[in-house]
Image (cartoon, rainbow, N blue to C red):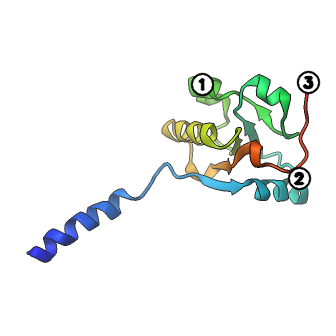
């Protein structure tokens, strides 16, 4: 009986440890390699969720800017049936957007967060200012 009392909490912790909102992750180095080796895939939405002024200051060519608040208000702005690579300044907003999309029915396998965001990205960027 004592063994069961010790084992039960461990089993509960293990069961609760599965994270259904876990998205794919990609480093900025992996993103840069993906862009330079494979180019942009027409089937993928490359999504930058920073504010418009941040995007204008510096962004990666090929990324579409839809600010985080817009996506939070209307998740349908992001196509539900396509793969999405989400980028922001670090990764905090990207994770929040991804979690919100999952809560609204998007598949975790279709969402990838760029860890480190554009602040860690060492590839070519564009400035509109």
Q: Which residue is mark 2?
A: 39
**100 w.r.t. 27: above or below:** above
Number of labelled discs?
A: 3
Q: Which mark is residue 129?
A: 3
Residue 50 in which image quadrant:
top right
Residue at 56%, 50% (x, y): give it. Answer: 108
Q: Residue 106: x, y in percent? A: 56, 42
Residue 51 in which image quadrant:
top right
Residue 71 horizontal side relative to residue 123, left or right:
left
State which tag comes first along the sequence, 2 or 3. 2
State which tag comes first along the sequence, 1 or 3. 1
| Quadrant into which the C terminus falls | top right
Dot 1: element = loop
Within-10-Å neighbours for mark 1: few <14, some 14–19, many 20+: few
Instruction: Please identify, in this view, whether the residue under mark 2 or under mark 3 is nearer the observer.
Output: 3
Dot 2: element = loop
Q: Residue 109: x, y in percent? A: 60, 53
Give how far apart the Cα atoms at labels 1 and 3 are: 28 Å
Give how far apart the Cα atoms at labels 2 and 1 are: 29 Å
Instruction: Please identify, in this view, whether the residue under mark 1 or under mark 3 is nearer the observer.
Output: 3
Residue at 85%, 49% (x, y): give it. Answer: 40
Residue 35 horizontal side relative to residue 52, left or right:
right
Circle 1/circle 3 CB separation < 8 Å:
no
Residue 76 horizontal side relative to residue 17, left or right:
right
| Quadrant into which the N terminus falls | bottom left
Q: Which mark is residue 19?
A: none
Circle 2/circle 3 CB separation < 8 Å:
no
Within-10-Å neighbours for mark 2: few <14, some 14–19, many 20+: few
Q: Which mark is residue 74?
A: 1
Residue at 68%, 42% (x, y): give it. Answer: 90
């Amino acid at each position: 009986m004592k063994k069961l009392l010790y084992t039960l909490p461990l089993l509960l912790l293990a069961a609760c440890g599965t994270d259904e909102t876990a998205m794919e992750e990609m480093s900025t180095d992996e993103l840069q390699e993906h862009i330079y080796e494979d180019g942009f895939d027409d089937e993928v939405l490359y999504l930058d969720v920073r504010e418009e002024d941040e995007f204008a200051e510096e962004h990666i060519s090929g990324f579409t800017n839809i600010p985080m608040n817009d996506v939070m208000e209307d998740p349908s702005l992001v196509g539900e049936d396509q793969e999405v690579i989400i980028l922001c300044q670090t990764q905090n907003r990207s994770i929040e957007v991804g979690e919100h999309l999952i809560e609204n029915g998007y598949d975790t396998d279709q969402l990838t967060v760029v860890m480190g965001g554009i602040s860690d990205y060492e590839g070519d960027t564009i400035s509109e200012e």
